Image (spheres, rainbow, N blue to C red):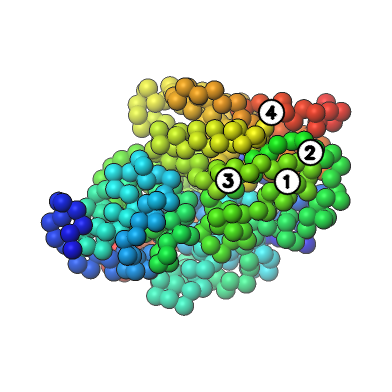
Amino acid sequence: MTVDAHYTGPTDPGFAHKVASYPGAEAVLHCMQCGVCSGSCPMSEFMPDPPRRLMAHILAGDRERALASESLWYCTSCFTCAVRCPQGISPTDVMFALRSMAMDQKKSLSTKFYKAFTGNVATYGRVFEAGVAMTAATHGGLKSMLRNAPLGLGLLRRGRMSLLPHRISGAGEVAALVKAVANRRVTGGKA
Amino acid sequence: MNFAYYPGCSLTTSAKDYDLSARAVMTALGVGLEEITDWNCCGASAAPSVDPFLGVALSARNLALAEANQRDVAVACPSCYTNLRRARAAATAATEVGMRARESLQEGGYRVSGESKVRHLVDIIVHEVGLGAVRSRVKRPLTGLMVAPYYGCQLSRPDGSFANPEIPREMDELLRALGAEPVWWNGRTKCCGASAMLTQESSALHLVDRLLTNASESGAQIIATACSLCHMNLDAYQGRVNGDLGTAHRMPVIYFTQLMGIALGLEPSRLGLGKAFVPAPVLDPYLEGVRA
C-alpha cells in the first residue's frame, strides 16, 4: 500500500499495535481511511499532516514519520473526531499516544509546555498557572514576553493570577503516583 | 443533595469568578458542594500528552478520595470533567489497558471502584435540581437577553457525557428557564483552541475569531460558557484577536453560573462579576438596583 509519494516502507511493522496499547487508542487498527477525522478536526487546516494521514503513517508502520509530524502538537483534544469516527477509534487518544512516544525526541514549545505542566503537578500536586504560562510566554524571548505582559498584568489586576504555587499536603502521594506510572512505562517496555 | 466538589486548578486562580458563582448558585439551589480535601490537578491535556496512563492515574486519585466519602463528584471545568470520567472508565475497564492502569494505581495505594459518578454542574442543575425548580427561583428574569450558549468541546464530548455530543440542548433550556433567549449558532460545540492558545497561538486565534464572528452574526449579545479555558480564550484573548487579525469584536463572555446568579437575584459580589476583560454593559439593566 502506498500512503504517499515519499513512502519508504515500514520502519516498525508492530507500530500500530504499540499505539493500540495506550488507553483509548485500542481501536486504531480498525481505521479504514475514510477521513471523517480530518474533515471534523478544527485544526486540520493548520496541520501539515491532517489526522487521516497520521493514521495512515501508523497503519503503515511508518513510526518515524508519525512521530516526527508537527501535526501531533496541534490537537486540542476537542474529541470531535472521536465521536464521529465510524470505526469507533478515538484519534484524540491516538494523538496522546503519539505525543507520549515523541515527547523526548525533540525540544519545542509544546514539549516544554507539557513537561512543565506535568512537572508542576508532580512537585506541587497542582498546576501553577502563572508558572506554565511563563514557560510559554518566555519561549519566544523578549518580544514574546512584552507581547504577553499586558495579559498577565490584566489577570493579576483582576485577582485572577496567583504569584506563588499552591502545594497540596498530599503532594508526596501525587509524586509517588507519578513515579509509579513512570516506572511501569520503562519496565512495561510497551512504549 | 450533596456532592464531592472538584473545582480544578483554574477555578482557584484564573477562573475564580467561575468558582465563586458556582458555589453561590449551587447553594441557592439547595445543592451541597463539599470540596474534596487535598484534591490534585487532573493533568488537563498535558499529563496524557506526556503519558496517557499518567492522565488516568492523576484523576483516579481524586476519584478514590471522593469514593472514600461515598459521594458523586460535581465538576465545573469540562476538561477536569472529561478527565475524571475517562479515568473512571479506564480504571474499571476489563481490558489489558485497564489492568495496566490499575497496576500503577495499586502501586501508589489507590483503588477506584467506579462507585462515585462524575457529574458536571450543568448536568446536576438540569437533571437533578430540574428546570422547573430553577424557574421558580428566578427573581430577575433575563428577559430580552440574547445569549449564545457555548458548550465548547469537553462538556459533551467524547461520548458518555450527559449531553448529545453534536447538538447538546441543556444550556439552551437552562438559559430559557432564566428568561433569556438562547440564540442558535454554529459555534456552540466548536473548539476555542484550548491550551493551543499557548503553543499554537496563530491557529487558536483564528478559531476564536470565527466563534466571535459567528456568535455576533447570530444575534448574540453575550456568550455564556461553562469552561474556564473557553472563557480565557474568548475573553482575555479577544483583544489579541482584534489586534492580530484586524477585527473589532466586542463580545462579552460570561460563565453560565454568573448569569444564573444574576437571574436568581444573588448578591453580585458573590458572583465575581467584573473580572472579565471585555465589559458587559448589556447586563446593566438586569443589575439595576442590585449593584452598589
* Mark 2 surroundings: few (<14), some (14-19) or many (≥20) residues within 10 A: many
Chain letter of mark 1 equals B
Q: How many marks?
A: 4
* Mark 3 surroundings: few (<14), some (14-19) or many (≥20) residues within 10 A: many
N-term-proximal mark, 1 vs 2: 2
N-term-proximal mark, 4 vs 1: 1
N-term-proximal mark, 3 vs 2: 2
Residue picked out by circle 1: B175
Comparing marks 2 and 4, which lies closer to the viewer?
2
Three-letter code for the amino acid on which mark 3 is drawn:
Arg
Chain letter of mark 4 equals B
In the rendered image, residue B244, in percent from the top left (x then y), is placed at 44, 24
C-alpha separation, residue under disc 4 versus residue under disc 1: 17 Å
- The secondary element bearing badge 1 is classed as helix
Chain letter of mark 3 equals B
The label shown at residue B142 is 2
Q: Is residue B255 visible?
A: no
Q: Residue furthest left?
A: A8
N-term-proximal mark, 4 vs 3: 3
Give the quarter of the image for residue A106. top left
In the rendered image, residue B50, in percent from the top left (x then y), is placed at 37, 53
C-alpha separation, residue under disc 2 versus residue under disc 4: 14 Å
Three-letter code for the amino acid on which mark 2 is drawn:
Leu
Comparing marks 4 and 1, which lies closer to the viewer?
1
Q: Are marks 4 and 3 in contact (CB under 8 Å)?
A: no
The label shown at residue B188 is 3
Q: Are marks 1 and 2 in contact (CB under 8 Å)?
A: yes
- Can you say whether B110 is above or below B76 in the image? below
Q: Residue at x 80, y 38 (%)?
A: B143
C-alpha separation, residue under disc 1 versus residue under disc 2: 9 Å
